[in-house]
Amino acid sequence: MKKLKENYNNLQKQLENPRIRAIVILSLYAIFFILVIVLLNLGGKGTTAIKRKPTEDSKNQIIDTQNYKNISSNYKYECNIEYNLDGDTTKYLLTGHFNQTNKIDEVSIYDNETDNYNTVEKPSFINDDFILLDKIISYVNEKEYEFSTTYKDKTIMKNYKVPLSDINDTYSKNTNIEVSVYELDNKIIKIIVDSTNYDKLNNSEVKNVLYTINYENIE
């Protein structure tokens, strides 16, 4: 206790020196500001996004096919198909046009060695129902989308789950395919169909089947 009192008296004497007192005050200010900066940084790292409940306006909306003028009357399409069978993926490119009836212009298969597509006969697994615009829209019509994404170019993607029973009423209603519809200026420009669960019914070795269809000249 005596030693503590001596130390306190010595500190008081040193603080009587204006220069030492100024240094001590500046040091205390510096320590204070350092603590504030550290606490702010720690607080920023722990901040998470605030999740808000959706308002009535932001809830999933039913797609309105009336927005797409003459949706199935006349258009061109290019369809990329990835077909993964037992771990091996084969890529196909299918081009065609629709004018009252469907017309496939060419089907080709990607050759990894030459890095080119070679013309082939249309494989039996390719399903026109996952390519034709009006057919795909009939699957998602009057369904609420699972989620949507708006891109910088104002393209809107809406993702739907379609029960297999909607494609064939003998199939399960508890298993789905996924359909992503891309809209720009109230017109569909692209659709991605993940038909894996559908194709697995015909071939158990199927791992993944993905259709990516780009549409042009929709009238």
Image: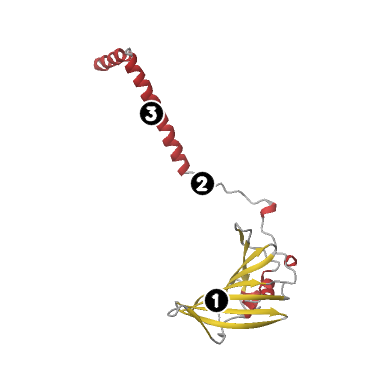
Neighbourhood count class around disc 2 (C-alpha, 10 Å): few under 14, some 14–19, many 20 upward: few
In this image, 21 relative to 57: left or right? left
Give the image location of residue 109, x and y in percent: 51, 81
| Residue type at numbered disc 3 | Ile
User: Secondary structure under badge 1?
Assistant: strand
Work out whether 8 lies above or below 78: above
Instruction: Tell me if residue 151 comes above or below residue 51 in the rendering.
Output: below
Q: Picture quarter containing residue 191? A: bottom right
Q: Which of marks 3 and 1 is nearer the N terminus?
A: 3
Q: Which of marks 2 and 3 is nearer the N terminus?
A: 3
Most foreground residue, 76 or 182: 76
Residue corresponding to mark 2: 48
Which residue type does callout 2 highlight? Thr
Label 3 sits on a secondary structure element that is helix
Residue at image coords 69%, 62%: 185
User: Label 2, label 3: how many angstroms apart (C-alpha)?
Assistant: 29 Å
Instruction: Quickly name the residue at label 1.
Output: 81
Q: What element carries label 2?
A: loop
Crowdedness near tag 3: few (<14), some (14–19) or many (≥20) residues, C-alpha within 10 Å = few
Q: Name the residue under label 3.
A: 31
Q: Which residue is drawn at 64% across and 63% down?
A: 145
Mark 1 nearby-residue class (10 Å; few <14, some 14–19, many ≥20): many
Residue at the image position 67 percent from the left and 54 percent from the top: 58
Q: Where is residue 95 in the image (x, y as percent from the top left)?
A: 60, 79
Q: State which quarter of the image contains the C terminus.
A: bottom right
Across and down, in percent, residue 154 comes to 64, 58
Front in this rendered view, residue 23 or 65: 23
How far apart marks 2 and 1 lie (CA) works out to 39 Å
- Position of 101 compared to 49: left or right? right
